[in-house]
Structures are given as structure tokens and as C-alpha cells.
Image (cartoon, coloured by chain):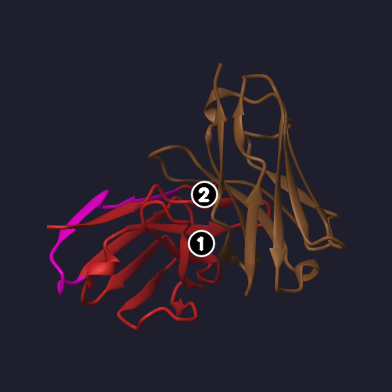
Chain colours: A brown, B red
């Protein structure tokens, strides 16, 4: 079945780095744009970053620009999010999301990142 | 940047009642670019409506979306117990994507 599975979350100190990964199954990954969306505890949804189907274009929310980097490997059906210079307010569940047209049709279950000293 | 404001913040209703959720944009949004999601506690969001009024596969017809320009609405005609959740509107742009802050539909 069509599925996205995130991994890599955990507890990290402020200023350190963490790399999230997302594995896609049962769809033609290389033809879809992919996004990361996060949700701080008890809060709403915040779009973080996206990457085009071919990996040639990335976009970032202002809150993470210059600190986060999104990449993909279409040969392995994987999406990554490199998070550097982490801050306490980056604490959230991070969702890997597939875009179809202009909406997000498939969501992973999320991986929790806690930034704390 | 376009800001989406959802109202009310919380809607207290009984099963069987009609729910009307509002999403107002700070600038005009093309109808193609407006979607709605449902999120239950401990779960990932689920796509309900895309392109303002098209239901996603498997979404019951008690859910409907409408609107244009800066004002969009999600309507649930008869609330079922499983519909009590948080609902988010979302706008897609060329290089940024925005969510409203959410409306919680709770059991009265």
C-alpha cells in the first residue's frame, strides 16, 4: 500500500544537528513533489520545506531557511531533512508528505524531534 | 505572505448537527489552491477536500467545501461521532504553503 515512513527523530541539544529520513513505498516516488510539515506539541501545522519531483528545486519556510536542507534519492525512494543549528522551538512532530497537484494527499505517521538541553 | 484565519477556534456541537467552518485568507486565493484536512489526536492529518470543493477518495459526502476569493467554508452536514476532530485549511503557493490555525470540533 502507498506509505511514507519517517525515521531519525530523537532528543538533541540546542545548536546540534539531526537528519530525518522518509521512505516511500508503493508509488512512483520520482514523479511526486515531497514536503516536510511539522507540528509543535499542542499546536497547529507548519509547512517546513519541499523539493520538486526531480530534486532540482527546494523551498523553505522562513523559520528554517539557512538551517534546514531537504534532499531526495529517487533511486532509493527516500526523502531527507538535514536540520542544523537546532533550536528549542524546532521541537515538533515532523511529517513527510506527498503532494499531488496542489494538495497533500499522503502523510507519514511522523517522527518526534525534541530539542532540549 | 498569505495568512489563513480559521473561525471559530472551537465549535461545540452534538452528533447529528451541522458544522460550518470558516477559513479566511488575507489575499485572494485561487480555488485550485485551497484544501482542508482533518486531524484526530495522535494521528497524522488526512486530506478531506482539495481544489476548494473536491472530496478526496473515501471521504463521505457529508463533507463539502465551498468558497472563492478570500472566504472558504467546510461544511459537515450531519456530524458523526468520528467527525469530532481538528480541521485545518491550507493554501498552496508557488514557493510556500500555509495552514490555518485550525478549528476544533468538539462534542457538546
Residue A47 in the image, given as x and y percentages of width and height: 57, 47
User: Could you say which quadrant of the image residue B73 lies in?
Assistant: bottom left
Q: Quick one: A113 or B86, which is closer to the camera?
A: A113
Looking at the image, residue B99 lies above or below residue A8? below
Residue A63 in the image, given as x and y percentages of width and height: 61, 33
Residue A64 in the image, given as x and y percentages of width and height: 65, 34
Q: Determine contact: label 2, label 1, CB under 8 Å.
A: yes
Looking at the image, residue A19 lies above or below residue B99? above
Q: Chain of mark 1?
A: B
**Structural crowding at the residue carrying mark 2, measured as other residues with C-alpha within 10 Å and reported as few (<14), some (14–19) or many (≥20):** some
Position of residue A100 in the picture relative to residue B2 (left or right): right
Q: Which residues are magenta?
A: B4-18
Instruction: Residue B2: give its label.
Output: 2
Position of residue A86 in the picture relative to residue B103 (left or right): right
The residue where tag 1 is placed is: B29
Residue visible at 56% across and 50% down? A110
Amino acid at each position: 500500500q502507498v506509505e511514507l515512513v519517517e525515521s531519525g527523530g530523537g532528543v538533541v541539544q540546542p545548536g546540534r544537528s539531526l537528519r530525518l529520513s522518509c521512505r516511500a513505498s508503493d508509488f512512483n516516488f520520482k514523479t511526486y513533489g515531497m514536503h516536510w510539515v511539522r507540528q509543535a506539541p499542542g499546536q497547529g501545522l507548519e509547512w517546513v520545506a519541499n523539493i520538486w519531483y526531480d530534486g532540482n528545486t527546494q523551498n523553505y519556510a522562513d523559520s528554517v531557511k539557512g538551517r534546514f536542507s531537504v534532499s531526495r534519492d529517487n533511486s532509493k525512494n527516500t526523502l531527507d531533512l538535514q536540520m542544523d543549528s537546532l533550536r528549542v522551538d524546532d521541537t515538533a512532530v515532523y511529517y513527510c508528505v506527498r503532494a499531488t497537484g496542489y494538495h497533500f494527499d499522503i502523510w507519514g505517521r511522523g517522527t518526534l524531534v525534541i530539542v532540549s538541553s | 505572505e498569505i495568512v489563513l484565519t480559521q473561525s471559530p477556534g472551537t465549535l461545540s456541537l452534538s452528533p447529528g448537527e451541522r458544522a460550518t467552518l470558516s477559513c479566511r485568507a488575507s489575499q485572494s486565493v485561487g480555488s485550485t489552491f485551497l484544501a482542508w484536512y482533518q486531524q484526530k489526536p495522535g494521528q497524522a492529518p488526512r486530506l478531506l477536500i482539495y481544489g476548494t470543493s473536491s472530496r478526496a477518495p473515501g471521504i463521505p459526502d457529508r463533507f463539502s467545501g465551498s468558497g472563492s476569493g478570500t472566504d472558504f467554508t467546510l461544511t459537515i452536514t450531519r456530524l458523526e461521532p468520528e467527525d469530532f476532530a481538528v480541521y485545518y485549511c491550507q493554501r498552496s503557493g508557488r514557493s510556500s504553503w500555509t495552514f490555518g490555525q485550525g478549528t476544533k470540533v468538539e462534542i457538546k
